[in-house]
Image: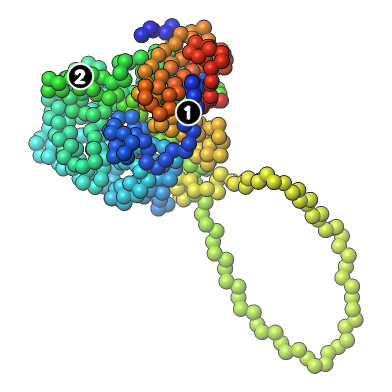
Amino acid sequence: MRTLSRHPALSLLTTTLLCLGGISSGHAQTLAQKNWAGSGVTVEPWWRRAVFYRIDPAKFQDSDGDGAGDLAGISQRLDYLQTLGVDALLLDADTPAQGFDDLARQATGHHLRLVVTLGAPASQAPASDAQYLTQARSWLNQGAAGLYVPTSALQKVDGAGHISVLLHQLRLMASSFPGDRIVIAATPQPSDMDVWRAVEKEAQLTASAAIQSTNPTATNLRTQLESALIGPPDGVVTTTRRGVPVAIDPLLRATRVAPQADVATGDRLQRTLATMLLASRSAVILEYGQELGLAAEHPPLMQWTPSNVTPRPPPPPEPKPAEAPPAPASTYGSFRPYTPPPKALVPPPKVPAIVVSDDPQPAVIDPNSLPGFTAAEVDPSLLASNGSTANVAVEQADPKSLLNFYRQLIQLHHDNAAVRNGAQTILNHDAEDALVWIRKAPSGSKNPSSVAVVCRLGAASVADAGLKVVRDLVGTSGNVVAIGEGR
């Protein structure tokens, strides 16, 4: 596997996906996704290439109008999460237990799983360990599909041996429950080899940051892209568990991207990172709002509308006072001559002409008339600086938005055999200043199409790089169909 050359400047970024040799499946994502264990389509574990969506419940949706998000608010947005195409929701460590049962039941109806983040034991005392494990068992009893362990939290109070014991007990506990429950561990510091061994031995998925910086430069972005792409040839990390070689699947996650000075460059950067994550063969963690391109000055509120405030219903009309009954008409009255009405000083308005057309006219909906994060006042410090454009109400209606680009990539990540487990080849397109890789469909797959991914890292045209890819693989007469395209 070769190493691509480094480039000093990041002038433009964009992403194009091409399907080579046939047309990729374009149908809408079904409720029971094909990679779910027990669906009858595959025996692959559900988590192997799942898309996890990480949520801070306090900042996702407020259901009762007190200004703070809650679990009932997540339930109100399950339709959105299902149409986004994610497989599981990863809830942060401060998740309240109250309301979890209802959320788990409703999430099951939307074919979504719940994974809960654990904190750390309060101390090194055995009683603290027992309380920690009791809390983990309580989440599993309430229907959690797995546990996420941030090893950095454990390292604050524990040594490597203690971490190994806790992870082993969590793994045994999760395995004792039906439904293929999992234990996910965040990657430790590179120097903590003992903790690394414990994580590799006990966790089914090991989460590592795909992008280490919230403001990547051209050089480190390309380096990290190459590192994430090249990796082990089979897409997994091989280690030894109890003397037996096993495969530990990586779990890719990206930190939020800092706002860029140029809006177009920031949009292309977001699309490049989305492609790097979802065109991989690994499971993926998305941060809430990442699919909208929310700015990363701070962990923001989820942005549903530009104002992010749910309009209050209009007050009911006040009852009219009862009118006195009319006086009985007099049989005889004084004579009143007829007086014609005065002529109007302003002519009546003209009736607008109605144009008959077979094309349906879409209704224009004010985005701020839709439900936002809360019905209370929103803390301005928690609003994203780009929230007027990076919100669900606006991006939902734009077929070329980042939100719809994520939906397309997630469907490709789930449904395309080449993306899931196809052989990978990185091509030399330094002349076009593009990072290009090919995924060839495995033999015997229903759809034999291969997928080419072109990430533009400079000013060269994506079309030029894409055309060069086509010539390299299938010649100028090959059948090429665009699957997704950045702006």
Q: Answer whether residue 102 is visible to the viewer in this image.
A: yes
Residue 401 horizontal/vertical position (percent): 53, 32
Along the line of sight, the residue nearer the viewer: 32 or 291: 32
Nearer to us of marks 2 and 1 is: 1
Q: Residue at x 34, y 34 (%)?
A: 35
| 117 lies left or right of 478 | left
The circle drawn on residue 284 is: none
Q: Is residue 458 visible?
A: no
Q: Quadrant of residue 157?
A: top left
| Measured Cα–Cα span from mark 2 to mark 1 | 35 Å
Which residue is at a point 43% across and 24% down the rendered structure image?
448
Callout 2 amino acid: Thr
Residue highlighted by disc 1? 24
Give me the residue at 20% from left, 19% from top: 239
Callout 1 amino acid? Ser
Outermost front residue: 444
Dot label at residue 239: 2
- Name the residue at the left extreme: 126
Image position, residue 256 (x, y; %): 41, 28
How many other residues sit within 10 Å of disc 1, few (<14), some (14-19) or many (≥20)?
many
Q: Is residue 418 above or below residue 220?
A: below
Answer above or below: position of 226 versus 361: above
Which residue lies at the image location 62% right of the left edge and 47% below the top edge? 363
